[in-house]
Image (cartoon, rainbow, N blue to C red):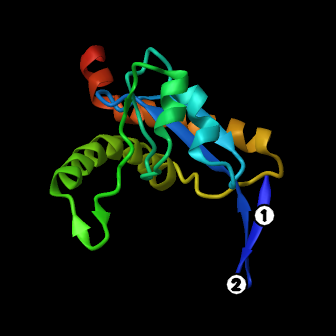
Amino acid sequence: MRQTKKGNQWYFGMKAHIGVDSQTRVIHSVVATLPMCTTRCACPSSCTERRPVCGATRPIRGQSEVIHKYAPKATDFTNRRYRYKNGVDELQRAKNKTKSSVRAKGRASFLIIKRIFGFVKARYKGLAKNAHRLFVPCALANLYMLRRRLWRLAGV
């Protein structure tokens, strides 16, 4: 765990990198890292041959070679720059919009984890304890997202 200071406010925490299935919106992998770790650190656990779509929830350029290193057949859904020297590439802008709609499915998982289950603060000193505490809301988020399908299977 690391701490940082912004103004006179101290922040103490970690980053949660999750892998989400683009069709069912189920979380399939979770990695807790230090705050200064980028998505490249967590990419090996979330990008594999079984998961054909890979991309960060934030548009980070320069990640495609890392994705193709761990999953050569994976589709990179990271946004590309569409503004360059006061010009706008409308084709690239449209592609980015499509990619963002796919990546938004991962954002919905964070909404459920943070707002519904209240996982917004690091409670313990140590990455391992906070990572174990992160896994429970991720499992509950899966149940929450699949609740209607589970009710239909149970006949309720």
Q: Quadrant of the C terminus?
A: top left
Residue 3 shows which numbered tag?
1
Pointer 2: what residue?
A: 7
Q: Secondary structure at mark 1?
A: strand
The amino acid sitting under disc 1 is: Gln
* Circle 1 residues within 10 Å: few <14, some 14–19, many ≥20: few
The answer to whether residue 21 is above or below residue 50 is below
Residue 140 can be seen, yes or no? no
Q: Is residue 8 left or right of 39 when viewed as pictured?
A: right
The answer to whether residue 89 is above or below residue 103 is below
Residue lying at the far bottom in this picture: please name it.
Answer: 8
Residue 95, percent from left and from top: 22, 46
Q: Quadrant of residue 142?
A: top left
* Residue at image coords 70%, 84%: 7
Camera-nearest residue between 64 and 129: 64
Q: Is residue 19 left or right of 45 when viewed as pictured?
A: left
The answer to whether residue 7 is above or below residue 142 is below
Q: Is residue 146 left or right of 118 when viewed as pictured?
A: left
Residue 40, percent from left and from top: 59, 40
The amino acid sitting under disc 2 is: Gly
Image marks 1 and 2: residues in contact by CB distance under 8 Å: no
Camera-nearest residue between 143 and 121: 121
Residue 154 can be seen, yes or no? yes
Residue 120, percent from left and from top: 59, 57
* Residue at image coords 35%, 32%: 25
Q: Is residue 155 left or right of 124 when viewed as pictured?
A: left
Q: Secondary structure at mark 2?
A: loop
